[in-house]
Image (cartoon, grey):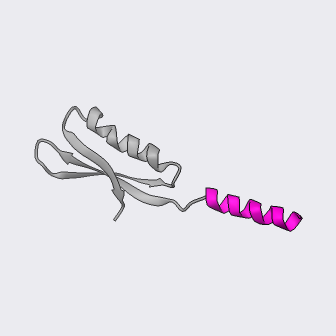
Amino acid sequence: MKIRLVFISAIIALSLSSCKKDYQCVCTNTNTGNVHYGDKMEANAFTKKTAEATCENNNNLSGGTLKDCHLEDYK
């Protein structure tokens, strides 16, 4: 019974922890049409939605100079 509990606990712990990936916020400058590469962010499955929301918020905070902000894998 203890072995089964340890095994189940290990599986749960592994499923909740995921590898962090590097992402970068990418936007298009409305004045020039150039692509703007923002800060590199490290996120896992639980924090990726927050990183996406932060990146997309650049559309509103830039005063209209940035559009189509989205998260991409860091290259």
Residue found at the very far right of the displayed protein: 1
Seen at 12% across and 49% down, the residue is 33
Up-down: is 43 above or below 8? above
**Magenta stretch prevailing secondary structure:** helix
15 or 36: which is nearer to us? 15
The residue stretch that appears in magenta? 1-16
Q: Where the C terminus falls, by quadrant?
A: bottom left
Seen at 50% across and 48% down, the residue is 47
Q: Is residue 13 magenta?
A: yes
Quarter assignment of residue 3 = bottom right
Q: 29 left or right of 19?
A: left
Q: Position of residue 53 (x, y in %)?
A: 39, 41
Q: Position of residue 2 (x, y in %)?
A: 88, 64
Q: Where the N terminus falls, by quadrant?
A: bottom right
Q: 6 left or right of 47?
A: right
Q: 31 left or right of 6?
A: left
62 or 13: which is nearer to us? 13
Seen at 69% across and 59% down, the residue is 13
Up-down: is 75 above or below 71? below
Q: 4 left or right of 59?
A: right
Seen at 30% across and 39% down, the residue is 58
Total number of numbered discs in the rendering: 0
Q: Is residue 43 magenta?
A: no
